[in-house]
Image (spheres, rainbow, N blue to C red):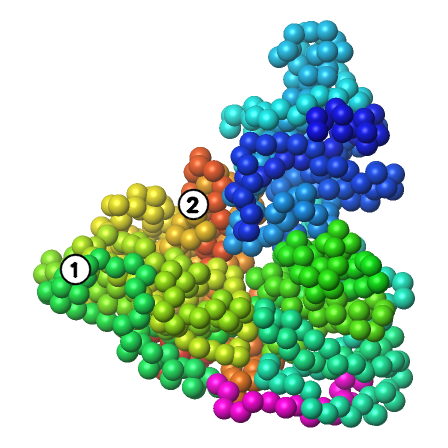
């Protein structure tokens, strides 16, 4: 249907310009035709009431301009950066527009936020949205003024006649612009014309977050809702055998006790929900429950998982990438070195715990979920309820952190099924203990490395074998024993990073059933890079070469990595001597299409070690908002140091015994070292930011500690003998 015909039929042609764009190649599950731009039908009731719309851009006749940040905001900055791309092309300042977070709608195609993908997939499509609107508005203006195309410019929400300097607001041109077809290939601004991209711009979501007026998942309330606190089996797969709810039901405010289900992938785990008029009553009622669980025996604990990884390391594993003559070259090397590196299972522990509000009626479902994947939640809820997806509404409040945890559907579906069961809108609130003990977690792993050196200290052969569990098995029961090209597991080490004559990457699957596993900030890069970058230092030490020089000599086939490493070394003043009692370590990687690394400086402090400084460099393409990039890198450093030095997840007979921040500690502000972040001045398209700076933190720190003490750390969290864990950060 032509745009003009559609607008006439929908009755909005004289009230607003609402445009969207098909986005090519940015959905995890679907691909769309490139270069296709078309109108997305506005909701007429929404136009009347001012509720969120589905198009990315909405301009009213009175010049009220709304831009929709369709990617959920979890602290990473998309609430600003996506509208900024549209505003750039429209010559608008962000303070001149309204920014709204829309609900889930398939017309946005891909509302997911994860894998550091938002800017690298939205860079061109969102600028096209703004540029298309600009061309339509200027075309409408040239027709009204009867002047030649190209005789107009735009500034501050106005089209300007370059001949007479007369101005027309965007709003005054909406009716005429809405009659035009959307250009399929609008002309984008040149880099020299950017006003917002690359400049320091304030994030509009920060003031309401500081004042407490922003709406997070935990803030959601609707009339008539009840609260639920859920007791779940401590070993995940346990089922309810008997419930004694008498004492619970005597707690003031408690209304009922019901058995409930949490779908976790293909698993359906049972719980017992206490329904109450307020959260405190639900919590106290839950504490008064007496539940007998039917649980399997001989489930894994921390020691058996560790021992299993060590045993599995003896296997050759499934080949991921391998040169035919690897073993021959390795065996012929003058020096043959091998080592194993262990990383633990970890919780995500976002500062805002999980909550979900769901209202299921006979033919409709409404959900308020702080989720990274609103479209996935919507589709999954429709499937569970056997309901048309059009009848499911998912609202997307802010997330108080996620790191991958809120990218899964389990907590949302638990709320949906419970609301259907009790026939009321219900808000489930997870305690901190619930979040740490019951959430899917990052898998632990064992990295086995082998390297060969010739008599001149040059790398001849390199092998990286990963022993690790799989998300696909944990959540979908995919058979991983001999699976070729396993998803996620080999990132980013499945292909050669450094130059060598031969290369080999392999994996061995660890069965960690029934532990639920899911992506964690930087996914398997957070574990695999620790082994790779520490082992490169081991090889350099064995060869008698400086770790920086050794790396640079092996990056001739990867000039982008080489330039970033050189940039990092320069910013860290790597070649300058340090004071006595200090040392530095270095690490680099490439993941999520970005290259990043750290130099970490440490010193001796009493019986412990103090981290003096962390210097980060990142090449993430053109910097849309440098302040936001620095904030993401700083957050990655803090999370990376926490993972390197604080507490692992601990298991006993399939139960998570870690429970709260006393035994799963976070890096505190007084423990945080000085952090410098340097952005490589790239002119290439934007790449990932939220995750690439995390994987190199642990190896850079371990390498620094070796250079200071001579102690080689191969197991996380770090323990170097006489240095107490809490003293590692001074």
- The numbered disc on residue 619 is 2
Q: Give whichever of discs 2 and 1 has the lower sequence position.
A: 1
Q: Circle 2 — which element?
A: strand
Residue 155 in sight from this viewpoint: no
Image position, residue 404 (x, y; %)? 57, 62
Q: At 87% from the left edge and 75% from the top edge, which residue is drawn? A: 277
- The foreground one among 186 and 549 is 186
Magenta region? 285-300
Image vertical order of residue 439 relative to residue 110, above or below: below
Instruction: Find disc 1 in the rendering and name its residue.
Output: 325
Q: Residue at x 44, y 61 (%)?
A: 488
Crowding around mark 1 (Cα neighbors within 10 Å: few <14, some 14 to 19, many 20+) is few
Q: Position of residue 568 (x, y in %)?
A: 37, 49
Q: Residue at the location (55% across, 31% down)?
A: 35
Residue 251 seen in the figure: yes
In this rendering, the label closer to the viewer, 2 or 1: 1
């Amino acid at each position: 249907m032509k745009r003009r015909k559609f607008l006439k039929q929908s009755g909005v042609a004289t009230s607003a310009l609402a445009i969207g764009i098909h986005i090519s190649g940015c959905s995890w599950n679907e691909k769309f035709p490139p270069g296709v731009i078309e109108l997305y039908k506005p909701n007429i009731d929404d136009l009347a009431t001012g509720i969120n719309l589905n198009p990315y851009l909405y301009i009213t006749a009175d010049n009220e301009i709304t831009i929709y940040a369709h990617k959920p905001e979890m602290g990473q900055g998309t609430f600003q950066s996506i509208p900024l791309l549209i505003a750039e092309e429209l010559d608008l300042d962000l303070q001149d527009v309204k920014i709204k977070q829309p609900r889930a709608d398939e017309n946005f195609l891909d509302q997911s936020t994860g894998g550091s993908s938002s800017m690298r997939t939205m860079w061109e499509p969102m600028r096209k949205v703004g540029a298309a609107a600009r061309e339509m508005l200027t075309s409408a203006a040239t027709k009204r003024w009867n002047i030649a195309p190209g005789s107009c410019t735009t500034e501050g929400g106005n089209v300007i006649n370059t001949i007479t300097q007369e101005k027309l607001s965007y709003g005054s041109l909406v009716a005429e612009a809405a009659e035009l077809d959307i250009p399929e290939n609008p002309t984008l601004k040149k880099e020299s014309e950017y006003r917002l991209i690359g400049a320091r711009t304030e994030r509009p979501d920060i003031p309401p977050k500081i004042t407490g007026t922003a709406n997070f998942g935990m803030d959601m309330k609707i009339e008539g809702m009840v609260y639920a606190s859920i007791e779940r089996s401590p070993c995940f797969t346990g089922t309810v055998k008997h419930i004694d709810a008498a004492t619970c039901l005597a707690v003031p405010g408690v209304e009922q006790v019901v058995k409930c289900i949490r779908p976790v992938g293909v698993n359906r785990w049972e719980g017992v929900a206490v329904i109450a008029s307020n959260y405190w009553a639900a919590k106290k009622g839950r504490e008064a429950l007496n539940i007998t669980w039917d649980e399997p025996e001989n489930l894994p604990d921390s020691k058996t998982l560790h021992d299993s990884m060590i045993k599995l390391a003896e296997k050759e594993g499934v080949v991921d990438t391998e040169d035919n003559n690897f073993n021959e070259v390795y065996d012929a090397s003058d020096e043959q070195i091998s080592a194993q590196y262990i990383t633990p299972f970890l919780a995500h522990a976002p500062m805002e715990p999980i909550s979900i509000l769901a209202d299921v009626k006979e033919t409709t479902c409404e959900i308020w979920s702080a989720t990274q994947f609103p479209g996935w939640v919507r589709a999954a809820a429709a499937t569970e309820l056997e309901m048309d997806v059009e009848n499911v509404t998912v609202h997307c409040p802010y997330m108080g952190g996620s790191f991958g945890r809120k990218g899964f559907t389990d907590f949302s579906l638990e709320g949906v099924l419970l609301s259907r069961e009790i026939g009321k809108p219900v808000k489930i609130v997870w305690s901190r203990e619930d979040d740490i003990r019951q959430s899917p977690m990052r898998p632990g792993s064992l990295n086995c490395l082998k390297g060969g050196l010739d008599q001149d200290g040059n790398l001849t052969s390199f092998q990286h074998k990963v022993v690790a569990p799989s998300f696909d098995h944990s959540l979908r029961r995919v058979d991983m024993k001999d699976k070729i090209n396993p998803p996620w597991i080999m990132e980013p080490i499945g292909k050669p990073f450094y130059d060598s004559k031969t290369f080999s990457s392999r994996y061995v699957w660890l069965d960690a059933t029934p532990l639920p596993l899911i992506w964690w900030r930087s996914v398997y890069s957070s574990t695999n890079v620790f082994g790779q970058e520490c082992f490169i230092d081991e090889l350099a030490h064995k060869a008698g070469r400086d770790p920086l020089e050794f790396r640079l000599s092996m990056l001739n086939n990867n000039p982008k990595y080489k330039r970033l490493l050189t940039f990092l070394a320069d910013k860290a003043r790597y070649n300058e001597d340090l004071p006595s009692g200090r040392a530095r370590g270095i690490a680099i990687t490439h993941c999520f299409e970005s290259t990043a690394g750290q130099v970490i400086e440490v010193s001796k402090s009493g019986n412990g070690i103090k981290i003096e400084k962390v210097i980060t460099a990142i090449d993430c393409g053109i910097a849309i908002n440098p302040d936001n990039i620095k904030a993401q890198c700083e957050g990655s450093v803090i999370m990376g140091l926490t993972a390197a030095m604080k507490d692992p997840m601990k298991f006993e007979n399939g139960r998570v015994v870690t429970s709260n921040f006393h035994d799963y500690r976070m890096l505190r502000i007084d423990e945080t070292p000085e952090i410098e972040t340097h952005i490589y001045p790239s002119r290439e398209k934007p790449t990932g930011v939220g995750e690439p700076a995390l994987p190199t933190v642990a190896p850079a720190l371990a390498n620094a500690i070796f250079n200071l003490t001579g102690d080689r750390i191969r197991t996380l969290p770090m323990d170097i003998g006489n240095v107490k864990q809490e003293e590692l950060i001074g």
